[in-house]
Amino acid sequence: MALERFEFEQGPIRPPSEAGSLLIRLTRNCPWNRCLFCPVYKKEKFSRRPVAEIKADISAMAEAAAKIRSISDSGSSPGGISRQALATIQAEHPELLQIAYWLYSGGKNVFLQDGDSLLMPLNDLLDILGFLKEKFPAVDRITTYARSKTLLRFSQSEIKLLGDHGLSRIHVGLESGSDQVLDYMKKGVTGEQHTEAGLRVKAAGLSLSYYVILGLGGQLLWRVHALDTAKVINRVNPDFIRMRTLAIHPASPLYDNFLDGSFLPLTDDQVIREELLFVESLEGIDSYLVSDHILNLLEEVEGQLPVDKEQMIGIMKRYLDWSAEKREIFRLGRRTGNFKFLNDLEQRVFAQPVEESYRQLQKHNISVDEQIRQLMLRFI
Ligand code: SF4
């Protein structure tokens, strides 16, 4: 029944870099669920899905892929379906569209959901990975989220075994390397545990992607947040460092701390100063740093370490050297979606409407900061 209707279950989130990946849900929600800054999965109970159910989902996806290929007239994309077939599927088989898009964009990447799926028994994980490769032999990248604490359940050779069965990258929410920040945010892990887990993943030969939350230390801990996060990263040398700026969601526990004044968030400009200190403190690593999230003010801070370090530092310094008014206009333009790069401010076609909005806010005595805070809530 499920196979005929191509039904399968999917969770609510995936990393931005997995936008084109096929999503396969192994677990539901997060087993920890206590991080103050996190609004996801709150009030939802964690559970492991039965292996048979997960395999049924994978089979349904494989059947859907086979049907899509049978509809397609030629293999004009790496995933073997043409643009014309995509249009036909959109019109006549909307239930197949998600898999069709995945195939059209290459059909190579899979992301295993939800927030901490390596909490499943090792043998179940190996079984699922084997089945996935059997049904989709062309898949060459399988990734998942994992908490550092969960990774420490596995020895290096067990992580390598997961790699041998096809798991290629692990996304870890490092958030911070500072014990003070991790403790305040109830992350449930220390900087040392982050380090140990990261080193294990690297030594096992898997790709490691770290998420760092800019601004997580707030006014009190921003410096130690920047320095200690860089320290952990310098020891681990992850393949990717992905930056994301803190935005306090009303559904997150941190919102109460924000309202009662016990957590004082950084302003955008302070976040860039913190980011500058962080990037300046990265030493002896060859990670690729990405700012691929709409919440980041300077998305163009991206590059290969160490060669692009000075160029990334230059972008932040250029912004900080601007006048207060110019920085405010850029921030407003960035948060309203008019600007992506610093150079956009120099282009009249982009800058004019933003400058007009800025003058209006000033005229009516409306705080630009408050306006920006409201705009940012749209992105979390
Ligand atoms: S471990 Fe991840 S998903 Fe779970 S509460 Fe923390 S940030 Fe949210």
Image (cartoon, helix red, strand yellow):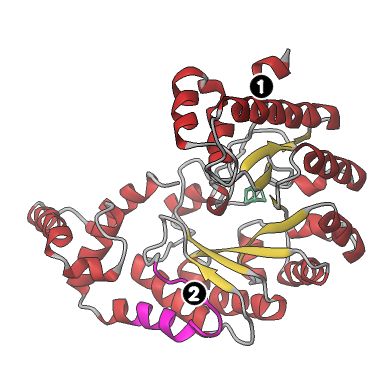
In the drawing, does residue 321 fall left or right of residue 55?
left
Q: How many marks?
A: 2
Which of the pair 131/232 is nearer the observer?
Answer: 131
Residue at 62% over, 43% down: 107
> How many other residues sit within 10 Å of disc 1, few (<14), some (14-19) or many (≥20)?
some
How far apart are the alpha carbons under marks 2 and 1?
40 Å
Task: Report the residue marked by disc 2.
Answer: 303
Which numbered disc, 2 or 1, marks the residue that appears first in the sequence?
1
Rendered view: 71 above or below 273: above
> Residue 75 placed where, x, y %?
57, 40
Q: Quadrant of residue 239?
A: bottom right
> Residue 109 placed where, x, y %?
64, 48
Q: Is mark 1 within 8 Å of ligand 1?
A: no
Which of the pair 39/17 is nearer the observer?
Answer: 17
> Residue 16 placed where, x, y %?
53, 51
Residue at 49% over, 59% down: 262
- State the mark number for residue 302: none
Amino acid carrying label 1: it is: Glu
Rendered view: 74 above or below 139: above
Which of the pair 278/70 is nearer the observer?
Answer: 70
Q: Secondary structure at mark 1?
A: loop
- State the mark number for residue 7: 1
Q: Secondary structure at mark 2?
A: strand
> Which residues make up the magenta segment?
300-317
In the drawing, does residue 380 fall left or right of residue 143?
left
Say if the magenta span includes residue 327: no
Amino acid carrying label 2: it is: Gly
> Residue 269 placed where, x, y %?
34, 71
